[in-house]
Image: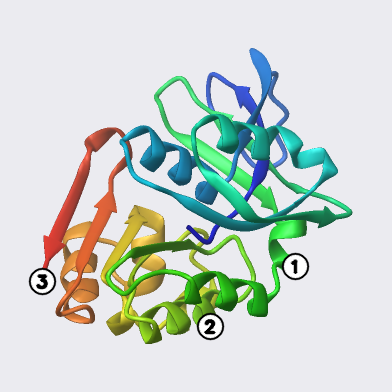
Amino acid sequence: MVGSLVVDRVMRVAAFPRAGQTVLARSLAVHPGGKGANQAVAAARCGAAVRMCGRTGADGALVVDALRRAGVDVGAVQQDDPSSGTAVVMVSDDGENSIVVAPEANARLPEAHVAAFLAQAAPGELALFQNECAGLAAGIRAAHAHGLRAWLNAAPADDTVRGVDLALLAGLAVNETEAEAMSGHADPEAALRDLAARMPAGTVIITLGAAGAIASQGG
């Protein structure tokens, strides 16, 4: 797992604020998070042997501790940054969420550290990435070169993600917004066809919020 370590500040609201509007949250909670950390914990709880590569600061100790408690190997987590990644998460009553992330330490994860981490993996192992850390494209190329099965959770879908060679991926997981940004298609089914065509040997999953998900395997 090459991914983000983030301190999540989660606010529950009736509905998301419109531009210029202030709303009161029903509650505020602080949790260990980050897409990379969350996926590492989930995989470990399912019985997988998981190694985590990432970067945080002293203020992110709760994230590293949560990984360790879940059985994740944190030997490749650097903990020397001045500021850990932080996310402000709003969760609405209808189950949707809106997230703003300050990457901080995640944006300063050295490419050389990632490359050395991936070089320790055996060919055929799964390497999972997302776009909250530095060096995404280089990491995916390194994983592919070492014979690893690279999966990408393409969030957030910005120019960095659009620069990734999807043909190098074994799998891609995106939501509707990210699928549109990467494919140019607002319709999820059309986006799925476009992305799958660019990954002839891979799996594409598009999550649809409360409506579930759609997927394509092998183009």
| Residue 143 visible somewhere in the drawing | yes
Question: In the rendering, which numbered label is found on residue 68?
Answer: none
Three-letter residue code for mark 1: Arg
Mark 3 lies on residue: 218
Q: Quadrant of residue 86?
A: top right
Left or right: residue 202 versus residue 158 is left
Badge 3: residue crowd in 10 Å (few <14, some 14–19, many ≥20): few
Q: Quadrant of the C terminus?
A: bottom left
Mark nearer the N terminus (1 vs 3): 1
> Residue 129 location in percent, x, y?
46, 63
Question: Residue 140, position in %: x, y?
Answer: 44, 77
Badge 2 or badge 1: first in the primary sequence:
1
Count of numbered tags: 3
Residue 34 coordinates in the image, percent (x, y): 58, 45
Q: Residue at x 43, y 33 (%)?
A: 96
Foreground of the two, 217 or 79 = 79
Circle 2 residue: 138
Mark 2 or mark 3: whose residue is earlier in sequence = 2
What is the C-alpha distance between the residues marked 2 and 1? 14 Å
Q: Dot 1 corresponds to which residue?
A: 108
Name which residue type carries label 3. Answer: Gly
Q: Is residue 153 visible?
A: no
